[in-house]
Image: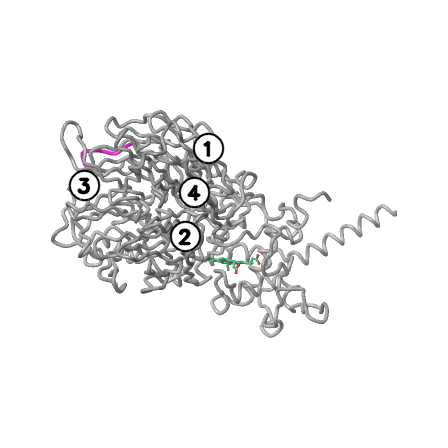
Amino acid sequence: MKMRTLALLAGVAILLTGCQREERDTRPDPVKGAGDQAVPVTSLAPGGERPVDTDAKAARFADNAFHMSEGKRLFDWFNCSGCHSRGGGGMGPALMDDKWIYGSSIENIHATIRDGRPNGMPAFGGRVPDDQIWELAAYVRSLAGKSSKAAAPGRNDDLMPHPSENRLPDATTLGRSP
Amino acid sequence: MTMPAKNYASTRFSELDEINEENVKDLRVAFTFSTGVNKGHEAAPLVVENTMYIVTPYPNILYALDLTKPGAPLKWAFRPNPEPTSQGVACCDVVNRGAAFSDGRIFFNTLDGHTIAVDAETGAAVWNNKVGNINIGETITMAPLVVKDKVLVGNSGGELGVRGWVKALDAKDGHVVWTAFSTGPDKDVLIGSEFKPFYDSDKGEDLGVSTWPPNAWQIGGGNMWGWISYDPDLDLIYHGTGNPGPWNPDLRPGDNKWTAGIFARDPDTGAAHWFYQWTPHDMHDYDGINEQILLDMDWKGKPRKVLVRPERNGYIYILDRTTGEVLSAEPFGAVNSSKGVDLKNGRLIVNEEKAPRTGKLVRNICPTASGVKDWEPSAFSPRTGLLYIPHANLCMDEQGVDVNYIAGTPYVGMEVRMIPGPGGHRGEFTAWDIANERPAWKIKENFPVWSGALATAGDVVFYGTMEGWFKAVSARTGDLLWQFKTSSGIIGQPVAYRGPDGHEYIAILSGVGGWAGAVVSGDLDPRDRTAALGFAGVMADLKDVTAPGGTLYVFKLP
């Protein structure tokens, strides 16, 4: 009896996470969360730490399988891969490691892609619709193993330059004992 | 020492013989100088009238050191402050290959596309002309060459759909006298009545348009980021052209003139005299911009004016430099992407089995995109008749992918993953017997040899390794005579000069980086083997043996 309830509960839990993972915003609400609030790239603040604003859109895009796989497609489409390769970097820095110049939150990454960065990161804002920038940002986090393994994109069919995104270890803990 | 290649023939041979095979083992450090820059140092120091000039990678600082004082203190520094955004559009680290001196001025290029003339005595800018546009991905990394009253400059950007060119700037005020593009209609390429190519495949009207799909030539590469030589008797300059873009060959059927070839031009007008295409319809990023060594020698019993080119596609070409005829083309490393050069029509015999296609993975293509030999210049000793060639031993897997042209972003369309070549060592230093068309000896190196070479009349040859060893070997046998471990990997160009005290000095910049060393200088993540256009994976262990940081080392005998 107890066993069955547990199994049932587990089943429901799996279904629920599955739902969130698969949720598709095919017609996203254009008003909420335009992604134009200030995104500090430092946690230092005179007068002590302040709570960081989160964008209303962030939660919708982070850890969502559909958006991340769209982000993966767009990563090639907009030539991100030309400068960052498959996350290992080249003309631009590596995105699959634990070093973030401008912050690792999805809001930070969104701001990086939208506004560009001074040492050669182009500003894609205005060229790429805002929702697609969020999708790219969600995908970039998966490159560093920073998103749910259940939602991150799976294996590539091509050259397979690194393990699939859902198998990449969290860069933050990489090389350190747990 | 007014130019990195030492002379217009680009022999990199120094007549100095105080340091020789016997005493080179006693070499010791005379002085050092930190450049304060952590990117790849590919430049050659220049020495003019007791002052040494070095130009750093981005931010392209020009330092002048006073050789007359103990420790060679800084005389002045010139900081051009290039635009930081230029770093994002430089394909393969933010390198600079050196400066040139003429008539009291130092000329050099900045990553963000400026050519600058600086007063060699005072360090004051004389003129500054912006000739490149980083917003379309155009950068400048090459060392200019001064011929008569003109400063010759070429652009980089073959990985970003930038159309290649060479420009001649007036040395007095920097205005552009002529521009010769590498693609497009004849009038843009400066092809006119003087143009007499040797082979039929280079004859015809506007081949720079008709050998491309419609308009593809406008974003077709052919950039000139390498070396120029000059023959004052024939009054011709020689320069190569880079790879066609994008790398994926499916997107540009045709011979893609005038990329991956070599031009002979009139230095005053830019008018093309002949052209030869090393790699028609290049499929593997085989830029044709390496150094050309101009020699007058007996070839098969006849005196000839030849041009020797150790080329990226893996062959050492001997050309008649008056006509552009290929006299010989022999492989000097592992090659399977082609099966030789047909000397009847001059054409490279392509191996279709190794042709990458969109969606098709082809394994074990030799050489890599970086070639058997990349930019790193070789040296020729007239005393041995040998050409000393620093190079790589690498192969690769390739797969074509679709790519959109978005100005100012990469336009490559190829996934690349490099692997060590036959034998497992990734670098070689080859002494090539030019007259007999075969190697005299070879030295194996663990990493690709990405530094230039220097040969001296003391029969000593110098080069550096990416681990940081600066080596002196016997010009005749290749035996290691001396080595010194510098602070970072070496990808610079060694030079010899006579100091104010009359003694011979040897100088080299240490500071790892460049395409091969980007994994260290750009702190890339080699778990992604395609990083750095496929170079990161095969260089993963470079991170374990060296760290970035630019330092000048100067050596002398006790």
User: Is B312 situated above or below B411?
Assistant: above
| Dot 4 amino acid type | Val
Circles 1 and 2: CB atoms closer than 8 Å: no
Residue, disc 2: B65
Please indicate whether residue A65 sits to the left or right of residue A10 in the image: left
Dot 2: chain letter: B
Q: Secondary structure at mark 4?
A: strand
Dot 1: chain letter: B
Q: Which residues are magenta?
A: B340-345
Residue, disc 4: B554
Q: Secondary structure at mark 2?
A: strand
Q: CA distance from mark 4 to mark 2?
A: 12 Å
| Dot 2 amino acid type | Leu
Which quadrant is the C terminus of chain B positioned in? top left
Any mark on residue B321, and which? Answer: 3
Q: Earlier in the sequence, mark 1 or mark 2?
A: 2
Q: Secondary structure at mark 3?
A: loop
Name the image quarter holding residue B474: top left
